Amino acid sequence: MGVNTYLGLVLFMTATSAACTKTVNECNSDSDCKDLAYPFCDVNGAFGPSGGAKNVCTIIPPECPIERCGCSPGATTCAGSTLTVCNTDGKSTTATTCSLGCASSMERCQSFTPLNGLGAALLAAATKPPVTLPASVTIDTTTGIVKDGSGAAVPFDSIVITQTGAPDIRAYIAQSVDMSGVVVTGSKAVAFVATGDITLHGLVDISANSSAAGAGAMETGSCTGSVATTGGGGGNATDGGNGAVSKDISGVIPGGAGGKAVMNYEPLFGGCRGGSSSAIGGAGGGALQMDSGTRITLDASAMVDAGGGGAGGDAMGGGAGGTIIVESPVVAINGAVVANGGAGGACGTTAPDGTRTTSPAFGSSCGTNGATHAGSGGTRTTPPTTGLTLTPVGDAGGGGSVGRLLVRTLDGSYSAGGASLISAAVVTQQLQLE
């Protein structure tokens, strides 16, 4: 073998070895590594791909720390019960604990799908800051504007969920929500959605006020009271009470029928209006949905009032109490949830709205021995009553139905403290995780 041939063979073998190991290029920084497939300079030989060799270019080591190798902004990994998200700088991460553990994809926390299309709101809430609402806050679901007691705007992001056959939902989203005294008005139902805790203190008022409807109440449909000479009460958890008209020579003429009970929780809507010929029947209480990825707590001072409105005139039906949906792995109700029906109208007096206790809103009576008596609103334990007329003097509207409370948790139950008071038809369900 000639000298030239021997040298050529040596050079060929050396080049082949270098091509296989990709360690032929020495480096002191990543900028020294020109091959895009091997861009990482392992100066200290600290990572597996270098095999312990120092100052060589390798693939990017899987175990390389984020601060050294960076990450893709927004990329997520989940291990055990810890979700790690790459921050926008691409050089740091944020870790959070998954209350339900990691999903099978290991790219996100295990979660659940909220009712009424609020899944997108729950995902979006993770990118929002925590929100603390002080006392005396007002929320207008029509415009989305949130104001404090002085009239100053309070930042609280929201999105609108469109529904078919019911008012739209205004969903307020945040990482966590802590509220102390809120009055909600407007045409849309209201939802509070957070990846973290939702905590209520004080009064959260979504109730109707006489003929003024609660946010997300129903104004039409089979659950609203019908009207003949008198109006029937609005329906929700039960049928509303029937109206009654004065006795004449033909006997008692039937009054307006009460609205029909509502059996479904999708779409979301509140109580239904009582029957009226002049738009002053009692209005329905509002609709509220709360979704949390961790826990929902009503402390001992908290009260959610979704009561129906009392009839605004003689012979009109009372409004039904509203609808509350609460979805979270853990729910603790240490305060009160009331959704009592409003009373029907009679005897020339203003009918009372649904109470904030377990007692019904009693309809007015007049005549000898209460011969004319408006129907009383329903509660958790008492159905709404029918209007009563025994003399040809005056007519009487029926009472509105009690509203509904649906609680969905990880085990299908919720805890109730010693101060808890619930006057709504309660249904519990177990969340389905995904």
Image: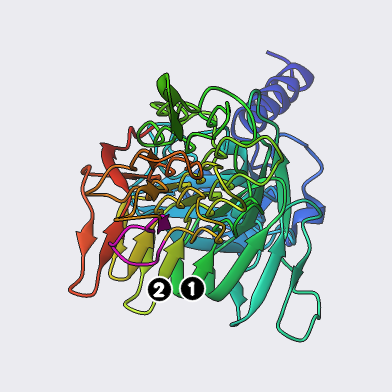
Pointer 1 and pointer 2: residues touching (CB < 8 Å)? yes
Residue neighbourhood size for the residue with mark 2, other residues' Cα within 10 Å, grouped as few (<14), some (14–19), many (≥20): many
Question: Disc 2 marks which residue?
Answer: 302
- Identified at 80% across, 75% down, the residue is 153
Query: Which badge, 1 or 2, comes first in the chain's sequence?
Result: 1
- Residue 116 screen position, x and y as percent: 54, 33
Give the residues drawn in magenta, as a range: 355-366
Residue 75 visible (yes or no): no
Q: Is residue 284 left or right of residue 369?
A: right
Q: Between 292 and 413, which is closer to the camera in this rendering? A: 413
**232 over 368 or under it: above or below:** above
- Identified at 60% across, 82% down, the residue is 134
Residue neighbourhood size for the residue with mark 1, other residues' Cα within 10 Å, grouped as few (<14), some (14–19), many (≥20): many
Element at label 2: loop
Question: Disc 1 marks which residue?
Answer: 203
Q: Between 411 and 218, which is closer to the camera in this rendering? A: 218
Looking at the rendered structure, the kind of residue marked 2 is Ala
Q: Is residue 260 left or right of residue 332?
A: right
Query: Is residue 93 highlighted in magenta?
Result: no
Query: Is residue 362 highlighted in magenta?
Result: yes
- Residue 196 screen position, x and y as percent: 47, 61
- Identified at 54% across, 29% down, the residue is 267
Quarter of the image where one finds residue 408 = top left
Quarter of the image where one finds residue 104 = top left
- Residue 361 screen position, x and y as percent: 39, 59
**C-alpha span from label 1 to label 2:** 6 Å
